Each structure stands twice: as C-alpha cells, then as structure tokens.
C-alpha cells in the first residue's frame, strides 16, 4: 500500500516541483517498487480523467461564436427599440398636449359663460321660525331654506342662533361662488 507521503511525493513529481536530484531519487524508487509504479499510473489516470472532464466543459469556437452572435442580436434589438422610443417620445408628448387642449375647449363652451344657473336658487334663505313648544321654554329657532328655481323648497336646516345661521349661509355662498364656473373673457 502506498503511504500519504509517497502520494504527495508522486504528485510533486508529476507537477515538476522536485529538484533534479529529488526527481532522480523518486524515479529510482518507482522503478524498484511495483506498488509505487502502480500508484503513479493511478495518479496519471486520474489526472487524465479530470482533464478530459474539464475539456468537455470548455467552450468550442463554434459555441463562443454562437453566444457572441446571440448577444449581438439582443443588443441590436434593444438599441432599435430605444431608437424607436426616442423618435416617438416627442410626438406622444405633443399628442397628449393636443388632447388636453381639445378637452378644455370642448368643456369650456359647455360650462363657462353658458348662462347656466346652479341647480338651486336661494330665496329667503334665513327665516325666523318660532318653536311651537309649550311653556316658558319656547325659544325662537332659525331656519335656512333652499328652494329650486320654481320656488319649491329642496331642504331646510335649523339653527339655535342667528349667528350660526348666518355663518352657515356665508359658507354656502362662498362654496357656490367657488363651484360655479366664471365666464372666460371674450
């Protein structure tokens, strides 16, 4: 049986790591010992097997050319698409601006300066209504009424004080001014 030291010595001999005198001594030992000779042959066979396995994994010229060709095709497609996007981007921006302008022009005539009135009209918005409760606890209540254009009541809101009613009325008028479109200058 070949010892670990002998295997290391044979590996060093195969790797040409020994001095000429050490190499001569190993050659003499291998020639005189059938076990060392068989161990050296076994190491040489293992190295050939590993080398063949690595060579089978190595790229051939044809496989390298194929991979380079595929990479070039991919890069060509990408650059073509980027060029296409680069050409159409200004046109897409212009089309979006044109669509926004056309939408604005369409709705401008529909709402601004069309003379449309809001859905309701405030007629007598704050009225004092006396609570019909019995006794000394009767207090006046204030009512805010919203009527349609025909004068029919749409809804009413009651308040305890005139200040609450006037504050609510001021907020409604402000909201009405903000929500009704202003006519565009002609």
Image (tube, helix red, strand yellow):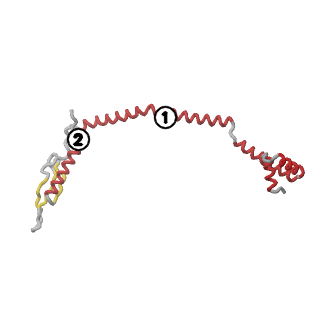
Secondary element type, mark 2: loop
Look at 56% across and 36% down and name the residue there: 74
The numbered mark at residue 168 is none
- Label 1 vs 2, first from the N-terminus: 1
Is 44 or 135 nearer to us in this picture? 44
Q: Residue furthest bottom?
A: 135
Question: Where is residue 100 drawn, in percent x and y?
Answer: 33, 36
Q: Is residue 103 left or right of residue 174?
A: right
Q: Is residue 90 left or right of residue 19?
A: left
Look at 62% across and 35% down and name the residue there: 68
The nearer-to-camera label among 1 and 2 is 1
Total marks shown come to 2
Is 70 or 20 nearer to us in this picture? 20
Is 91 or 61 nearer to us in this picture? 61
Identify the residue position indicated by label 1 in the image. Answer: 82
Secondary element type, mark 1: helix
Identify the residue position indicated by label 2 in the image. Answer: 181
Question: Where is residue 46 drawn, in percent x and y?
Answer: 78, 48
């Amino acid at each position: 049986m070949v010892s670990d030291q002998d295997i290391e010595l044979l590996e060093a001999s195969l790797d040409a790591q020994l001095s000429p005198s050490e190499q001569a001594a190993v050659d003499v030992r291998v020639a005189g010992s059938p076990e060392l000779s068989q161990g050296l042959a076994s190491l040489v066979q293992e190295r050939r097997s590993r080398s063949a396995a690595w060579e089978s994994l190595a790229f051939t010229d044809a496989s390298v050319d194929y991979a380079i060709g595929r990479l070039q095709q991919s890069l060509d497609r990408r650059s073509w698409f980027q060029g296409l996007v680069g050409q159409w981007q200004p046109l897409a921006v212009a089309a979006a601006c044109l669509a926004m302008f056309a939408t604005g022009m369409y709705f401008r005539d529909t709402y601004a300066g069309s003379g449309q009135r809001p859905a309701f009209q405030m007629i007598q918005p704050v009225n004092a209504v006396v609570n019909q409760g019995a006794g000394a606890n009767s207090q006046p209540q204030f009512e805010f009424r919203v009527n349609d254009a025909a004068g029919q009541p749409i809804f009413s809101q009651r308040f305890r004080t005139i200040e609450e009613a006037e504050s609510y009325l001021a907020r409604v008028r402000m909201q009405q001014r903000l929500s009704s479109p202003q006519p565009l200058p002609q």
